[in-house]
Structures are given as C-alpha cells and as structure tokens.
Image: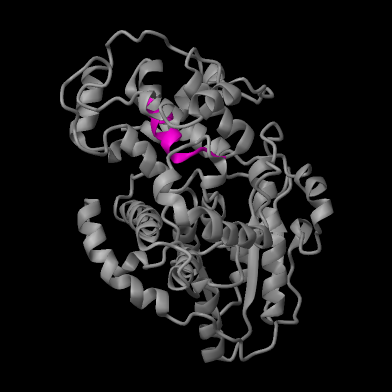
Amino acid sequence: MQALRSEHNPVLDVAILLGNDLGLPVVVVHALENRYPYASHRLHRFILEASLDLQAGLEERGLRFVRWVRRAGEGEVDIVAKLAEPAAAVVVDDVPTFVTRRYADELAGRLSAAVWAVDACCAVPMNAFSGHLDTTKKFRAAHTPLRDKYLATELEQRPAVGPFAGPLDLGSGEATDRTLDRLDQLIETCGVDESVRAVPAYPGGRTQALERLDHAVREVVPRYKWTRNNPALAEDSTHLSPYMHFGVLSPREVALAVLRAEQAGDVHPAARYKFFDELLTWREYFHHRCRKLPDFTRWAALPEWARKSLLAHAGDERERVYELEALIHGETDDESWNAAQKAFVLDGWMNNNLRMYWVKQLLRWRPDPKEAFAVACYLNDRFSLDGRDASTYGNIHWGFGDAKKGYREIDVYGWVPPRSDAALRRRKGVGDWLAEQAGRDVPRVSVPGDIADLVDRYARS
C-alpha cells in the first residue's frame, strides 16, 4: 500500500468490493523497501509511524494486515508478488510519480491474476480526464464541475467475508508486530541513510494528521488567502502536504472538512476558494500532468522554449558556483536561500513561497541548467517529506520555465524569469525570521560522490 490510511481510501474500497463479489477475504500488505532512491531514517520513520495507525484502522474494519520491511542484506524476493501468486486479484495504488508507477506496471506483467490500479491521490480521479489539459485554465474549467460529484460519492465499504486466517510466509522481513517504541531499532537493520534523521515535528501517524487537519480548518484556512505566503508565520501554514504525499490524509476528506467549516460559517468563501485552488486545482493539475506526461519528473518535460533558452545561456559566466556539499548544508552567501535549504534539511518541509525563490537561485550556482535541475530535484526528493511528489515536481518545473516567458532575455536565465527575495522580505517579520533560520546549525549529512549520477537520473535527454 502507498496510501497509508484505513479510511477515505478507494484502493481499500475497491478491494473490498471485489472480495465481496467473489466471496473472498481481503489481505492488505504493506511492504517497505530499502532500495528506493534516498531511503533514509527520516522517510522510513514517517512511513512506519503511518503504517502502525493503518494497521489499527484496518483491523477495526475486519481486514487482515501484514507488514514486511526489507532489511540490509535481504535476498531479492519480491514479497508482494510472492504473496499475490494465489490471489484472485491484486489492487494497488495508482501513483504517477517516483518508483510506484513503474513497480505497478512490472507487477502486473508478472502476475496471472488481474491487477487493478486505483487512484487514491486525487479527489477527482486522474482517469476522469481522457486527454491532456495543458494549462491550469483548461484544467480548472474541466475539474471544477466534477468536484461535487466525487466529493459526495460514498466510499466506505464493509467486508462481507471475515479476515483471512491462513498462513502468510513473510520470511525474515516480517514486521507486523512492531510497536512505536521499536521502530528505530527496526530501521537500524534496514541499511538506509541514517544521516537524514526523522523530524519530531512531523510524526507520521494518522492520529497526528487528523489533529493537523482539525487545526488547519479552525485556525489556518480562515486566513489562508492572506497569510499563506509569509514563511515567518509558520502557524499560518497547514503543514498537511507530507501527510497527503504519503496518503495518510485524503484530499477528499480535507476538502470535505473545509466545506463543513464553510457551511458552519467558520470559513469565508473567499478563503475556501483560495485553499481549494491550491488543494484541488494546482495539486491535482500537477498529478494530471504527471499522469499524461511520462517524463514529467525529468528535464525533458520542460517546455521546449525554456530548455532551448536555458541551454543557449549555459555558457554564461556564473558569479559563483557552489559545490553540492555547500548547497546541501545551506552554506552560500545568500541568507534567504540558506534559510530555505536548512528548512529542508532540518525540518523536512519548506514554505511554498520560499521554495519558489529557492528553486530559481540554483540556476545561478551550477555550471549548466541541466545540473541545476538535477540538484533541485535531488534536494527536494532526499530531504523533503513532501518530495518525490507530482506537486513538488510541478514547483520545480515552474522555476525552470514551465510558465510564461519573461519580459526580456537576460544572462544565465535566458527567457526564463528570475525571482528576487525583495517581495518576500517586505512581508511582516520575514527579515528577522530568515536571519534566525539561516543561522541554525546543520548536522553533516552524506554527500554523493558524483553529481553525474544525479544528472543521469533527472536530466538525461
């Protein structure tokens, strides 16, 4: 499972419907690999905390749950494929980014049973649109009329068959009986990057996610339209994106919570509209694009004009070229950028307005734009809890020209508009906040030995 929630989860509901129709029980398998790119203590801890709450919720729904975690030195067994061999059907998450889509395709090719991929990422399913809607204007026009239908759809299904009671051979990767106080002990055996540590401010459990959602609806969304772009007002960000990336929260349940608050008079329609434009238009537009453009996470998916313009200026003199180690640890001469990068490394999350400045600056500090793009994706994917996501790739694309052209051609950027931090610093309290954040100490983390590997991953032509 990738959507780590036991409620508002269409993957589970489709599986239960199939099981009821066939008269068979549903078994839910959560398999956690250690070989995904940038596997770390931070990501493993968040995922496993969410998995514990997932387990409790599924058992309440009368479903059998098993957890498997690959340890260091584990054999090449694909536990999901192994357990699925006798199954009548397999239901997986339809996620368009990172390793999930490739794995689902490979799994379907190996199994004789039917494999169903179900969208639990979006409130309006990605398959609701047959063609590629290549602008937000087109997408908003097509998406908005469908929202009421899908938000009103009753999802929760009840299993008509009792939980599966037979044996399930998980080998040495069995981890179903783990508890919260034993997670670090488990992670130590996995061979993942221990230098990128978990962030206590972002526990992965659904209980904490629902508390965040309740706080966001009561305290943040009512003023979201007016305060969301000020990173100094940390309490005025919802901080829901990590939970939505890992499927701990559903966009559907977030939207319904806001609608209930609006109906109760606690959220102004203008605030709800702006929040929905981010949650349902921009977030789902990026998922739509990622689904329709197979190379969305790569340099090749940028508009042709942007790639040509940036490459035409690849030879322009850079005022500074920072090595990857300095960038990782936020050790540049740019206080605003350092504050942003340290938010990634220390907090695992960055304010979106700050991220828009952060991504643009990288073009100035690497020898060519393909390297800059690869570094942006790498820093986002390795350190951010909401990295490896269609939305954050969309933000990176914006920084590299996936928007309108600038007003004039300039050095380094060509026709891609630059961005200064002047407007950011004019916001109340931001100057002092940036100085404080940039001054934080960052523990040393491991640094890749060859940036060419990153360029090959993200920017290969």
Provide residue 73's location: percent of width, then percent of height.
73, 43
> Magenta residues: mostly which secondary structure?
helix
The quarter of the picture where residue 399 lies is top left
Q: Residue at x 67, y 66 (%)?
A: 54
Provide residue 2's location: percent of width, then percent of height.
56, 60
Q: Residue furthest left?
A: 408
Q: Residue at x 20, y 37 (%)?
A: 404
Q: Residue at x 84, y 52 (%)?
A: 181
Magenta run includes residue 352: yes
Q: Quadrant of the C terminus?
A: top left
Q: Nearer the viewer, residue 294 or 421?
A: 421
Q: Name above or below for residue 445 compared with residue 19.
A: above
Q: Nearer the viewer, residue 87 or 31?
A: 31
Q: Quadrant of the N terminus?
A: bottom right
Q: Nearer the viewer, residue 180 or 340?
A: 340
Apparent side of residue 395 relative to residue 428 in the rendered image (left or right):
left
Q: How many marks?
A: 0
Apparent side of residue 96 relative to residue 437 in the rendered image (left or right):
left
Q: Nearer the viewer, residue 242 or 18?
A: 242
Provide residue 337's location: percent of width, then percent of height.
48, 23
Q: Please give the range of residues in magenta.
A: 349-360
Provide residue 356's location: percent of width, then percent of height.
39, 34
Q: Name above or below for residue 456 compared with residue 89.
A: above
Q: Residue at x 35, y 58 (%)?
A: 270
Q: Name above or below for residue 361 compared with residue 153.
A: above
From this viewpoint, is residue 288 visible?
yes
From this viewpoint, is residue 297 visible?
no
Q: Name above or below for residue 112 compared with residue 4.
A: below
